[in-house]
Image (cartoon, grey):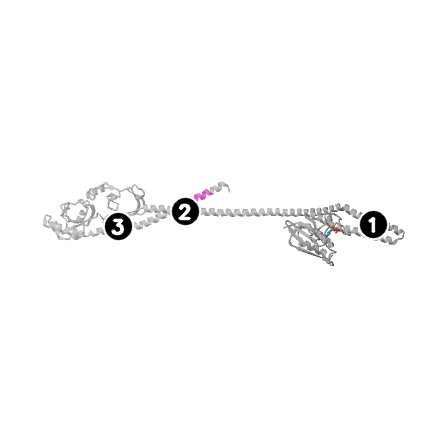
Amino acid sequence: MTIKKQHLIKTSVTLLAGMLLFIIIWAGGYISWKSGIDKLHVNSQQQLDQFASHLDARLARFKFIPQLISKNMILVELLKQPDSNPRRDLVNHFLEDINDIIGASDTYLMNSQGLTLAASNWYKKQTFNNKNFNFRPYFIDAMKGELGRYFALGTTSGKRGYYFAYPIVYAAQNLGVIVVKMDLSNIELNWSNRKNQFIVSDMEGITFITTQPKWLYQSIKPLSVETLQKIHLSQRYDGIDLKNLDIEVLRSISSHSKVIRISDSAERNNNEYYTIQKNMPNAGWDVMILAPLSDLRNNRLITTFVLFLIVISSLLISFLIWQRLKRQHEREHFQLESQKQLEHQVDVRTTDLIHEIDERKQTEKILRETQEELIQTAKLAVLGQMSASISHELNNPLAAIHSYTDNARKFLSMDKFTQVDENLCRILKLTKRMSKISSQLKFFSRKSNQNMEIITIQRVIKSAIDIVSHKYKNSSSVIHIQSHASGLKARADIIQLEQILINLINNAMQAIESQNQGEVIIHIERQNKWALIHVDDNGLGIELEYIEKIFDPFFTTKKSGLGLGLSISARIMDIMNGKLTVCNLPSGGARFTISLLVEE
Ligand code: ADP
């Protein structure tokens, strides 16, 4: 895959993830908003119903009272005789009592022209008496024989009031109208400190009850000139400058519920409301509840933000997990690679080692062969050095054999057989000696099969004793080992060492031949890096004048000795990097010591 393609895939995945993120967050916000609106609707509808019921209940208290009072004959009589002061007083007092009992604002009686003949407030300075209210629609309705009901501001008091008017019928004739006015001043008092606001508007859309005082006496729909004229004539809002409440419908949810904005606040977000409108047909009013949307908006914002946090955290956690897995994978891959590399290195090293071992074996073989050759060469060199002595040793008997042979021939020609035999015996003796010399040389020049190796000294000594002990089985002398270091090891040629030991034991046994209690003791001891083998005897020892010559070839004190054993042994020890030395023991015997380097 090219880098360009990889980049394209990465960008597409990022875009898709971004879109998904946006959709999730948007959907979360929308769901929060939708469920909020639903809850708000149910809640607002309940409150609106309660508020409308409250208004209805307040109005219902006075609805039938005018009708009830209209049946009283004293009212009819006053209407018949309006100039009668006693009748007027009677009705004034009657209406005052009634008004007190029912708790109305004012109760008053109007004649058929709209002139007030008697009123419950007859005693007040601003009494309705003698005032004409024929412009009020409730009067007109009542004069038509219907129950007049009307909202208006009192022209005298300026207070909000609701009027119920009923005709006073006598002999099928409308003589006048009885009116009960109720005070609406504090009707919204208990509802004003809630979150939701309420507006009650009349048929023309003028607000006259509201929990928000600044919205009072404002039109919630555009007012035509005719409507304004009509309102002016009815003096419903006498002296009030009616204004428009600037309501903008943002969304219509149903015919009754809308989302609106009231542009009367500097703060844009706080003036959006969810509204439900309800008609009160009896009163001719519209009641509206306005539930602020600020909480809902905040909830939506919080939900969106929380969702954003959750999604971002999830993404972060996923990213971290992915990173961790990736790192783990990389680590495993690295470990695998390292292991492979190590195995490869081990393989290479093993091959190298095998090669090295082969080379070493080869080198050791060459070394061994070279050493063998060296020893052999050294031996031959020794024999070469000794050849003068040997030829001298052999020439003498040869010369003697020659002269004895001549003599024998001469005696044979003279038939002197006794002398012939004598000479032949001498010749035989001489050839025996020559053969002995030859066998001694052969013994030492024998090529050892073994090479230099690590040996346990005590074992080699035991083996040498085993070889010689057979020869001395009838001897009264004894051979034994006294070891202080039985496990001591050294590097030596086992056969050569054995030969040297045999030679030393033989010499010692010969030295103690004449002793009664002859004894050969072989000690092993360690001195620093040296392993020492002492071959001691309890013979007469070596005379001082001989001690320096003892390792010379053919030095012997014995009648039948050859004098080759010690000289050859000393040279072999040199080749083995060891030493052969001699001394006399304080007790009188001789001590021959073989020194070899210790192998740990
Ligand atoms: P050979 O035994 O044929 O004489 P060696 O070289 O073995 O030849 O010995 C040389 C001489 O050293 C001997 O003749 C002897 O005088 C002396 N010698 C060797 N071993 C002893 C010994 N244990 N005690 C006394 N003298 C010894």
Q: Which residue is mark 2?
A: 311
Q: Position of residue 91 (x, y in %)?
A: 13, 50
Residue 133, quarter of picture: top left
Q: Position of residue 74 (x, y in %)?
A: 12, 52
Q: Nearer the viewer, residue 347 or 589?
A: 589
How far apart marks 2 and 3 lie (CA) works out to 44 Å
Question: Badge 2: few (under 14), some or many (20 or more) residues near its Cα, within 10 Å?
Answer: some
Q: Secondary structure at mark 1?
A: helix
**Residue 569 visible in this rendered orientation of the protein:** yes
Q: Which residues are magenta?
A: 10-20
Q: Is residue 52 magenta?
A: no
First in sequence: mark 2 vs mark 1: 2
Q: Which mark is residue 201?
A: none
Q: Earlier in the sequence, mark 2 or mark 3?
A: 3
Dot in front, 2 or 1 = 1
Whether label 2 touches label 3, CB < 8 Å = no
- The answer to if 18 sits in the magenta stretch is yes
Q: Return the disc, 1 or 3, that comes first in the chain's sequence.
A: 3
Q: Is residue 417 left or right of residue 340?
A: right
Q: Secondary structure at mark 2?
A: helix
- Give the residue number, with chain letter if any, for mark 3: 51
Nearest the eye: 415 or 583: 583
**Amino acid, disc 2:** Val
Marks 2/1: CA–CA distance? 126 Å
Q: Which residue is mark 1?
A: 401
Residue type beneath disc 3: Phe
